[in-house]
Each structure stands twice: as structure tokens, then as C-alpha cells.
Image (cartoon, coloured by chain):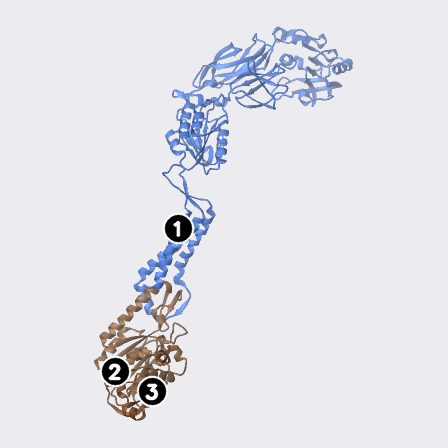
Chain colours: A blue, B brown
Amino acid sequence: MIEFLTPLWLVAAAAAAIPLFIHLLRRRTGTRVEFPAVRYLARAEREHSRNLKLRNLLLMLLRVAAIVCIATAAARPLIRVAGSGHAPTAMAIVLDNSLSSAAIAAGRPVLEELRAVAGAVASRAAVTDRLWLITADGTVHGGTPAAVAQAISHTEPLAGAGDVEGAAVRAASLVGGSGLAEREVAIMTDGQATTWSAPITLGQARVQVYRSRQAAPRNAAVVEAEALPSRWTPRGAVRARVLTPDSAAFRITIDGRTLARGTAVKDQEVLVRASPAERGWSTGTVEVEPDELRGDDVRYFAAWIGPAPAIRVSAALGRFATIAIEALVQADRATLGADVTFSPADEATTLPALLVAPSDPVHIGAANRALARLDIPWRFGDLRRGESSVQSTSRDDSTFKDVNVVLRYRLAGSAPVATDTLAVTAGEPWIVGGPGYVLVASPLAPDATSLPIRAAFVPWLAEMFSQRLGREAGTIVNATPGAMLARPAGVDALELSEGQRQAITGDSVAAPDKPGVYSFLTGGVRAGALVVNPEPAESDLRRLSPQALASRIRATSVRSGEDSTAVRAHVFDSAPRRPLVLPLLLLAVVALVAESTLTGRSRGGT
Amino acid sequence: MDTARARRADLLDPATIAALGRIEIVARWIVDGFLSGLHRSPRKGFSVEFAEHRPYQSGDDLRYVDWKIAARADRWVVKQYEEETNLRATIVLDVSRSMAWRGDAARLTKLAYAERLVAAMALLLLRQRDAVGLVRFDDLVRTSLAPRVRSGQWQRIVAALDDPGAGHASHAAAALEQAWRLIPRRGLVVIVSDLLMDADEILSQVRALRHAGHQLVVLHVLDPAELDLPAAGDALFFDPESGAEVPAASADVRGAYRATVTAALQEWRQSLAAAGAAYETVVTDAPFGVPLRRVFATRQRMP
């Protein structure tokens, strides 16, 4: 194969048409010369026509060859010379060590197979090559073939998906910036369909893809585990989903204690309610039986578990409120105490509190003064009468469906924040909330609003007391292994394990590589939880065919297969290139000398 | 000696000598120069009668020096003789259009060269008391002067050279037949032509003339450019007589052309020799003395 460094000069080869044109048109000349001995000339052409035609053809070919050789030499051709090793090559090996590569197929981990092929590729590298290893987590190892081979042998599977596509792009960037003309990227992957979901562009590199030849094993995995709500008082629920071809047995634990067992079927959401005895931050798991891919058999969740809120109920609220609190107490969702105040606003003296408008307009002034004392930025305004429906500001909240308002006070916020509004009616805030308070703009009486007589009233109260007005427990952040996270407000450290803390100084923090539940700390006090789990998509082990895999990659050339021998044979297949300028110029000189000799001979005599 | 040779008109460049005067003057210079260069008198072997003396010139045969006068007057004179002859010669000149061509403007056309050569030959023969006639031809017989030895014959020949010609063909057969009619007895026929004609046409007449006992000399007049194709590049060469055209690249075909011309001249030489005729090529850049000497030699071999 011939390549040209300055191919534009090949246009000059079109000049080769000149002698050809002259050769074809030479007998159509318009110059007439009087010559009486034409009969001798005609006889000469007749008797020597064969020699003359051959000579003219030879002359034309020599002239064409000379022009073509010179033009081609100007284009600076390079020819690949086979059989003498390979040209210096920049080779980047992408080793897909994502979680799915840890699956056992045909008795051994897929990664072991990929490592073997990658090692074979690295063994073909020469000292003149540049070699890198890029793993799915973006780690780059460069250096001698021996060093890269060692890095390959020490590569372990990740706990998550990593970014194989990003690693491939990084590999292309490395070989592209190597300064070498030959650039190759060898990708060793299990061909997981969820990994290679979108086309990637690898630019000016030849890409060789090895896809594991083993069939994808059956896999059961926990792909969802979540505490609902994240704050249990102490009742709560665990929502889980298991990826399984048919059904799988599962177990739910809290701090190592089994909370529930069961069998999940394909695509079924599992919801387990519980009221555990544990208190404080707890680590929960949802587990399935071990299978060919162990990394996704356990999924973690975190929950804050505390006692039921103690509520002080004002008698001025009326019988509907009293009955509702009694129902919560009977259901162990609340107790009677002094943690949270539930009263008309004019009686409020402490926070947290769920406050409602006083039933007598006379007490509005006292209510506003109480709000002022509690630093609540809302005030009761004009009395509004007229029926209007209520809408929740939360999209999926159906609590206020069919709830109407007949009497209310217009709420005026001194520094209102949009997110403080929990429900609106007639385009105005009706229920607002803030740190330690929830404020309702109507009395809880049927002649003011239908809320107290709706079935959703009691659960709404429970939600308000346990989640909204309960003691602040902190936040829960879900992440994948190794992912970069924004630092939660106020958090200054991450507790990796008992006694091992990692200070957080920047605006972001890297999630640990190992799945589990980790603690955010603020001033040494636990302020939240970081839950690390693999990507659910990583548990889907379905694979792309080598052809489909090749179609997802755009590069100079892409070869994809599952034959490790072929992969080894096709990498470093660029033969060394030699310049052809000098041989072409010599050839042109030879052609010109031959042409000159031939022309001179005909002019000199027979 | 070199100076003497340089002054001889028969050895000068034909174009140079032709530019010096009219044809009869030039012919006289040529003949005078030619005769002065002979070491032996042209009259040797003929029945002669003394006519006059003339001063001895270098090259004269010492046998004709009048020793009595040399002894008496101490000067060398040579005896000259009036001679009688039985030779009748006819010069057949080709005046076709192909003869009016030259490959170089510095040279004479073949016809101009041939006319001066014919005039010189006629004068030389007449001075030997040979009867000389002239036949000019192209596609027709343009001139036909019967051989005469009387005074004024040479002027008539020279005047006839101005007659029209330059026809579009060369019909030598008719001209030779006319020459045969002009010299019914055995004689000498000198053909001056570029021979750009069919060989069979002329050879049959040559054989007939030889059969009748005539001596034939064929002077093949050639321009040097006809021996070596002119450098015209890629051109369309055309024959002014026949109009035939041949496209050729002169540089490419020159070698083959030379070989062909050499072969053609060799064919003429062989076929004319087989027919009993003497054949000489005359190149128009050669001094007139060269062909003149060959014709003279042929004449000398005749009785």
C-alpha cells in the first residue's frame, strides 16, 4: 500500500497526458512542407512502419513514465514494506473491567479472558512502539510492554460500570497525541449492550475490538433498594426491585438483622413495611442468592430510624384534629407529648409546630404577633370567603384531591420562598412550610375547608409530624462507585469505615469504589448517608454481537471479533514505510536517458 | 597549386559561381577551368589538323609543346589542332516541377544546377567538335534541338534552356524516344534528371537506346536535403508534382528515410548498369567539375 505525504502533487501527473495527446495528434499537424522526394518518404514509412510505430510508442511510454515518476515523487510516496516487523505504533489497550466483567462464564471470570487477550496484544509491542493500558475507571498505565503487561495482569473488576466508552475515547486521544503515524486502539470488552449504548468516535485510529467469546451468564440482581421514607418514625418501608429471568429469593436486612424474606418475580416491585427497633442511622441491604455475578447480588440503602413524634394538641383546633391525633397515637405513628405543637397560630409559643388559622377572626392579630415572635415570615391577611379547590405544589401528591376551601385568610409572606408553599388555592398560598413550622391559612373546621373530613387528612398529618416537623436527621445521597458528587451543605468529612475519615475540602467528593453505606459528618456528628451501589444497568448482561459492536465505533477502521488469535494477528499490522522519492527520480532519469538515446539514435542514423 | 585550384570555376561552390553571371558566362568559366585542369589534351586519340598555337599552361601534355619555337624564341607554346569527329551527343534534361526545388535557399535548385551543367557539357563537347543536341522534357517534350557542331549551336542550346517547363510530371520515355530520333547513328545520350519517376518507364527506353548502339550516361541530380530529410518537425510533406502527401515527424523518420534513399539509389545504379548505362549521382552542392569530369571520362572512352 502506498501513501502520499503531499498528495496534491499527484495532480501534476495529469501532465502525462501531454505526450499522449501529442502522440495521438502528431499526424494531424497542419504544417505543409514541399518535398519532391515524397515517394522515398512514403516508401520509408511503408517499409519501416512497424519499427516506427514501436519506436513512437516506446518514446511516448518513456515520456509518460518520466512525467508520472516525477509527479509521483513530488507527492512524496511512502510504501509499506512487509516482512520486516511493524512500523512504530501508538497502541492503547482498553480493558473493560466493569462490574459485568466479573461475571463467571464457562467457569472463569470474563475479565480473566479479557486480560489474557490484552496481554497477548501487549506482548507484540516493540521498543519503538508506545503502549498504554486504559481501564474502565479511566486509569491509564503507560510504559514498556512489560510494565503494561504487569498492569494488565493486576487489573481487577470494578464495583460499578465505570466508563468504558470514555476510556476508549481517552485511548484514541492518547494515540492521537503520540506523534506516531500508526495509531491503534485495541478494546477488550464483554460487549455489554448497556455499556455500548451509543456510537462513539475514535478519530484517526485503527480499532480492533475483542468481544468475549463466552455466552453471557444468567444473572439475578437487586437493581433497586430504597427506604420509604428515608426517615422512619419508626415505621417505614423498603422498596426493592430484583432483576431476574423468572424469580429470585430475596432478603432484606437492617444493620445485619433480617427484616424480611421473600421471593420476587420478574419486573415486580417489592415493598416491605417495617417498624424496626433500631434507632438512628441504619444500613440496610436487599440481597438475592449468589450467582455468576456477585457484585450486584447485594444492594444497600440507608434509613434514619427514630421514635414516633410526641405531639401537643390544642383543644382549640376542634374535634376533627383531636380525633386524627388519637388515630395516629393508636397506630403508633405518634405519641402525646411536647415535641411538636399542633395548635391555632395565636396559641403558638414554640417550634416545631403545625399551626392553623384561628377559627375566630378576632384572634388574627394575636396569631400574627405569635408568628412574629417565632420568626415565621408569614402573616394572616384579609379574610377570604368563597369556595375554591386546593392544589398541591408537589407534582405527584394527591393529598389535596377534592379538598375545597370556603374560608381562609390570605397569607402574606414578608420574605416568602416559593418552595415553602405546599398547597395553593385560588392562585394564592394556602399551606406554607419552613424550618420547624407548617402554616395552614384556614381553621381545621368543615365550614372552612373540607380537608379535616377527607381520608387523606390523617396520613398528611403523620407525614407532616414525622418528616417535615421531625428532628432534622440529614440527607441521603445515592451514588455509583467512584462517581464524583457535589459536597452536601455543611458536610466536612466522609466516614469510610469505623474510625477512618476522609476530609472533604473541595466542592466535590469522590464516592468510594466499594458499594456500601458511608456517613457524612459535620463537626464529627453524623449528618447524612452516602449510599454507593452499582448502576442497575450493569446487571443486564445482554451482549452486542461483534458486528453490532463495530457499528457503534467510528474510526479509520474498525475490526471486531471474538477470535483472540485473529486479534493478536491484526494488531501492529502496519508494515514499516519507506520513502519512494529516490527510486522514482532514478526511474524518471532512466526513462529520460532512454528517451534521449532513442531520439538521438533516430536522428543520427539507422 | 592550391591557389590555382581555388581560382578554377569548375571547383567553386555552384551557388557562388552561378551568382557571378549569366548562364553562358558561367558555363564558359566552368569549361575553361575544367580544361585547364586536365593534364592531357582532350584531343588525344582523334584525327586532328593543326590550327594554332597557344601559350603553354600548367598541366598541358609536353608532347604537344612546339619545341622548335621553344628553341627559337625561348617560350613554350602548345600546338592546337582542329579536329574532326563522328560523335553526336544529345543531352536530355528533365525540367519538371520537382527539379525546380532546393532544400536550402543558399543552394541552387536542381534545375538551375542542371542547366548550368548542361550548358557546360554542351560547350565542352562542342569545343571537341562533337555535335551536341538538347531535349528538354517534363510531362511533354518541351525542347528538341538536333545535334549540330556548327557555330552558334551552343547559343541555341543556352537559349533553349530558357524555354518553359516545370510540368507536373516527368515523361522521360517520350524524351528519350525523341533523342533517339535526333541521333539515328550511334552516339552519346546524357540524361540529366532527378529520376523522380517510375523506373520501368525510363529503363525500357535506355535498353532500346543501348541496343541501338548508343552510350548512355544518367546524371541523377539530388539536392542534399533529399539525401537527408529536412528538419521540419511534425509536418505534412507533399510532392509538388503529384500532390501526394505524407505526414511524418522528420526527427523520427529520418533514419528510415536515409536507408530508403540509399536503397533507392542502389536500385537505380544496379538497374541502369544492367541496362548498360553509366549512372552518377550529382548533388547540387558539389562543384560542377565533378559531374563534368565523369561525363568527360565517358566521352573519352568512346571512339
Quadrant of the rendered structure where residue A347 is? Answer: top right
Which label belongs to residue B300? 2
Kind of residue at badge 2: Gln
Please tell me which residue is depicted at 27% across the width and 79% down the height of the picture: B217
- Are the residues flagged by discs 1 and 3 in contact, CB closer than 8 Å? no
- Are the residues flagged by discs 2 and 1 in contact, CB closer than 8 Å? no
Kind of residue at badge 1: Leu
- Mark 2–mark 1 Cα distance, whole angstroms, equals 66 Å
Quadrant of the rendered structure where residue A531 is? Answer: top right
Please tell me which residue is depicted at 40% across the width and 65% down the height of the picture: B233
Of circles 1 and 3, which is in front?
1
Q: Position of residue A587 (x, y in %)?
A: 38, 51
Q: Which residue is mark 3?
A: B154
Mark 1 crowd level (few <14, some 14–19, many ≥20, 10 Å Cα): some
Q: Which residue is mark 1?
A: A586
**SS state under label 2:** helix
- A76 horizontally vs B130: left or right: right
Q: Specify the subunit that label 2 lies on.
A: B
